Amino acid sequence: MSLHRPLVVVAVVTSILAILHGQEMDIEKLKMCTMFPGIPGSPGNNGLNGRDGRDGNDGIKGERGYPGFPGVQGPKANDGRPGKVGPAGQKGEKGDKGYEGPICNTSQMADLEAKLQLLQDNLSQLRKAFSFNAGIQDVEGKLFVASIGKTNFENAKRMCREAGGELVSPRNSAENKAIYDIVREMGKSVFLGIKATQTERLFKYPNGDEIIYSNWDSGEPNNVNNNEDCVEFKSNQMWNDVSCDYQFSIVCEFV
Ligand code: GN1
Ligand code: CA
């Protein structure tokens, strides 16, 4: 206990001193009030702006406006569906008879086969006979056939045509050789179907085309006496222009 006594003493003394100091302060204030009125303080600063007020109520609805301008024309629409089928037209005229269909009959087929065989046999026989005849030559299916007798150009030409052919007009060396094989055996000249035009002296085939092949003898064509529009195929296979009035042997060609 004796150890705490100094602390208690200090506490008591401190309290007393505080009380005395407080009384001194109050006495000073009292002195000042009794001697002068206080100086008014300066006005305070304005306060901050208040917050925005609330939105007002909606106004009255306005009058209806004028109609706007028409809009831009839109793209073309797709085609519509096809319409209904119209009424049937009038009946047409009867058509021509159609081609005959394939032969399905067995007996008809047998008959045709027999005829075909006969034709083949006949053709084979003719080929043999032709090959024996020195007056007939075959160049790739084109037949050159000699006739009997002599005649002028126009008559020889007519005779060949009446037989279904033309006077010979060799278009290449092979055909010229075939005609030569005939003429050499006969030992006589023949007329060609080629003829010269009067003014231009152009040699042309019976169909009017200009010739594409020739085998003129040396110095030919020379148009002696201005009267040699036709062509002689000589027995040496060379060509010579001559008068159309001469009489020569006849060789026709058949295509
Ligand atoms: C013949 O005969 P001469 O010479 O006049 C021939 C002519 C020949 C000529 C060739 C009608 O005429 O076409 O170009 O030989 N006339 C006859 O030398 O054959
Ligand atoms: Ca001549």
Image: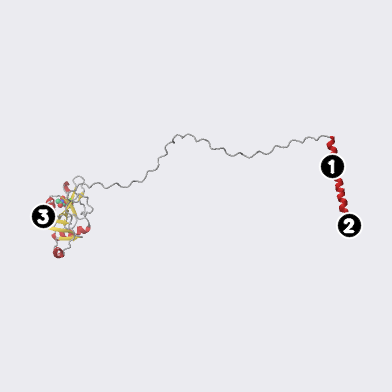
The N terminus: image quadrant: bottom right
> Does the residue at mark 3 contact the one at mark 1 (Cβ under 8 Å)?
no
Rendered image quadrant of residue 39: top right
- State the image coordinates of residue 202 (x, y, percent, origin top left): 21, 48
- State the image coordinates of residue 68 (x, y, percent, origin top left): 44, 36
Of labels 2 and 1, earlier in sequence is 2
Nearest the eye: 74 or 241: 74
Real-space CA distance between mark 3 and mark 2, rounded to the nearest whole angstrom: 191 Å
The C terminus: image quadrant: bottom left
Q: Which residue is mark 3?
A: 150
Query: Which SS class for mark 2?
Result: helix
Specify the amino acid type for callout 1.
Asp
Nearest the eye: 35 or 42: 35
Tell me what residue is drawn at x 22 percent, y 58 percent.
173
How crowded is the residue under tag 1: few (<14 C-alpha within 10 Å), some, or many (20+)? few
Nearest the eye: 218 or 21: 21
Q: Locate residue 149 relative to residue 46 in the image: left or right.
A: left
Q: Which residue is mark 2?
A: 5
Q: Which residue is mark 1?
A: 26
